[in-house]
Image (cartoon, rainbow, N blue to C red):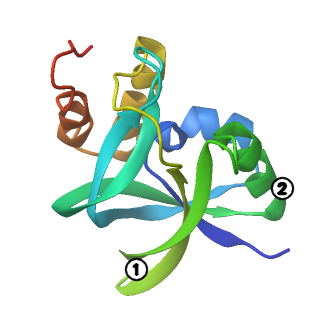
Amino acid sequence: MSKKLYLAYGSNLNLEQMAQRCPTAVVAGTSTLKDYRLLFRGAYGGAVATVEPCDGKSVPVLLWEITPADEAALDRYEGFPYLYRKETVKVKHGGKTVSAMVYIMNDGRDINPPGRYYYGVIRQGYLDCGFDTGVLAEALRVYPHKKGL
C-alpha cells in the first residue's frame, strides 16, 4: 500500500478528529511551512483555514503518512476540487527536505472569521501538537473591521 505525506495546518492538526476521519493515517512529525501565512476565508462566522504565500511568515504544520483511502476521505472533507485544490510543497523533516501534499483554498473567497467550534477544533490541534497558538491568534487579527473570537 503506497503512502504519501500530507501536510495539515488547520482542523486536521486535531488528533481526535483525524483518528475518526482517517483511521489509518500515522503522524510523521511536525515541521514549519516557511513563507506562508494562515488565513480564514469564506462566509463571515463560517470561514475555514487556508494558507497563502507570504514572505517572512511561517505556519506550524503536522505531517501525516496517509493511504489512498485516507486521501479519499480528506478529499471529501476538504471539498476537493471545488473548495480546495491540492499542491505539493517542500518542508524540512527529519533533517532533510521532503515533498508533501497540502490542500489550499481556491481563489475567490473573502477573509472572514471562523465559527467558534471550528476555531476550537484547530486550537485543540495546536495544543495536541505543542504549537504556539500565536500564529492561530494572528490569523484572527487580519480582519480589518470585524471582531475576532
25 vs 61, left or right, is right
Rendered position, 83 above or below 147? below
Which mark is nearer the camera, 1 or 2? Answer: 2
| Residue located 73% across and 72% down the image | 3
Rendered position, 17 above or below 3? above
Q: Between 61 and 127, which is closer to the camera in this rendering?
A: 61
106 vs 73, left or right, is left
Q: Between 92 and 149, which is closer to the camera in this rendering?
A: 149
Residue 64 in picture, x, y percent from top left: 58, 60
Among the 4 quarters of the image, the one containing residue 86: bottom right
- Specify the amino acid type for callout 2: Ala
- Specify the amino acid type for callout 1: Gly
Residue 118 in picture, x, y percent from top left: 48, 22
For label 2, the residue is 69
Rendered position, 44 above or below 78? above
Residue 14 in picture, x, y percent from top left: 51, 37
Q: Earlier in the sequence, mark 1 or mark 2?
A: 2
Rendered position, 84 above or below 20? below
| Residue located 34% across and 85% down the image | 95
78 vs 22, left or right, is left
Residue 107 in picture, x, y percent from top left: 48, 48
- Secondary structure of the residue carrying tag 1 is loop
| Residue located 61% across and 56% down the image | 85
For label 1, the residue is 94
44 vs 27, left or right, is left
